[in-house]
Amino acid sequence: MPYWMKSLWLPFLFIASVQAAPLQKIFTDWQITCNNLNYCVARNIPGDNGLVMSLSRYAGVNDRPLLRIDYGNRYTGDLKGAALQDNLLLDQQRLRPDFKHWTVEPHHLVTAHPIAIDEFLTQIIDADNIQITWRPQSTISLHGLKAALLLMDDIQGRVGSLSAWVKRGSRSVWDVPPEPAAPLMRLPGRPAAPLTREETTGLIDYGTWRVNADECSLDPMRREVSVAPLTDSKALLLVSCEMGAYNMIDLAFEVTRSQPWQSRRLTLSLPFASPGRNDRQLEIINAEYDAANAQLYTYAKGRGLGDCGIATRWQFNGQEFALAEYAEEGTCDAWHGSDDWPTLWVSQRPSPP
C-alpha cells in the first residue's frame, strides 16, 4: 500500500485525497501560494528590480512542474540588456546551466522538463543569490527558496519521495496523493428574465434614496447604483457606499422585482480563512455583475497601480452566491496584474449536457 494511503486510514473511513488549506506565506525573500487543489507557485520577492524566478507545480503524479526566470514584465515592458543565457551569476560566479531542455529567449528562460528543473535546483538551492553580469542590482535572492519548496513538497505529500524537491527519499514518484477534485459549481436552472424599464427605474430609485444611511455613508447624490436580474422574482442591487482613492466599497442586496420593495442584505462568505485574516466574510469592493453567466466579480486593489490585492468570482446558483475563484497577490512590487495573481481557490463548471 502506498505510504500516503497508510496515513489516511481512519476507523471505518478512507479519504481519497489530501486537501490542504489554501495559503500564501513568505519565507525571507520568497513567497509561496497554494490553492485548494494543492497547486503551488513560489517566486522571489520583491520583483521591482526586474528579475524574478518562479516555480510552480500541480499536486499528484501529473505534476507539470514549471521553472522560469524573467527579466521585465507588463509594467516595465521590454528592458535593455544582453541575453540572460550567457550573463547569469551565482554568488558572483558564472552560472551555466544546461539549456538543452529550456525555451531560451533573450530575457526569458523557461523549462517544464523535470530533470532540467532538478539539475538547476541542485545547482542553486544552497546559494545566496543570482545576478545579471551587466546589472548587479537586478538580483534573485535565494534566501527562503528551500523553505518555500519544502512547504510545497509537504503540502503535495512528496517529502521522502523521489519526486520531492528538497527532502528526497526512496519512495516511488508514483507514491504521492492524487490531486484533490475541484469543487463543482451549481448553476441556476435557467437565465432570469431581463428587467423591464419600469423595474430598472424603480430599483435604481430605491437603491439611491431608500437604502438606510447607517448602512451607506456616501451621499445619495454620489452613489452609483446598478441592478440586474437574479431570478424572475428577485434582482441584485449593488450600491456604492464608501469611496476611497482607488477602491469603491459596495453593499449588495437581494430585492424583490415588484413593489412593495423588500430587500435582504447579501454577504459573501469564503470557504477558507484568507491569508492574515480570521474573518471569512469578504468585503464587496469594486463589484461587477455578469448577468449572462450569473457571476459576481470583486476586485480590491492593494494600491492604485493594481499590482496587488484580491480578485474574486462568485457563481449565483439560484439561491446564493458560491465562491468560484479567489486570487490574491499580497506583495506590492509591480510584478504582475490581477490576471496573473496566484489563485487560492478554483472550481469547475458542470459539463454541458
Image: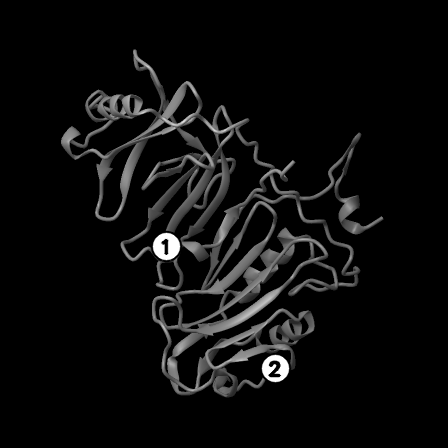
Image coordinates for residue 194, horizontal then vertical, percent: 39, 28
At a point 47% along the width and 45% down the height, the residue shown is 326
The residue beneath circle 2 is 99
On screen, residue 259 versus residue 106, left or right, reads left
Label tally: 2
Q: Residue at x 81, y 50 (%)?
A: 2
* Comes first in the chain, label 2 or label 1: 2
| Residue 211, horizontal then vertical, whole percent | 24, 22
Residue 57 figure quarter: bottom right
Which x, y percent locates residue 309? 37, 50
Which residue is at the front of the view, 151 or 22? Answer: 22
**Residue 324 pos. (x, y %):** 51, 40
For disc 1, the neighbor class at 10 Å (few under 14, some 14 to 19, many from 20) is many
Q: Going by the picture, which residue comes out furthest to the top?
A: 260
The quarter of the image holding the C terminus is: top right
- Residue at image location 25% in from the left, 21% down from the top: 202
Considering only vertical position in the picture, is 91 above or below 287?
below
Q: Residue at x 74, y 53 (%)?
A: 176
Q: Secondary structure at mark 2?
A: helix
Instruction: State the image quarter where residue 76 is shown.
Output: bottom left
- Amino acid type at image mark 2: Phe
Tell me if 191 is positioned left or right of 49 in this view: right
The amino acid type of the residue labelled 1 equals Cys
Residue hosting label 1: 308
- Give left or right: position of 57 versus 2: left
Residue 150 figure quarter: bottom right
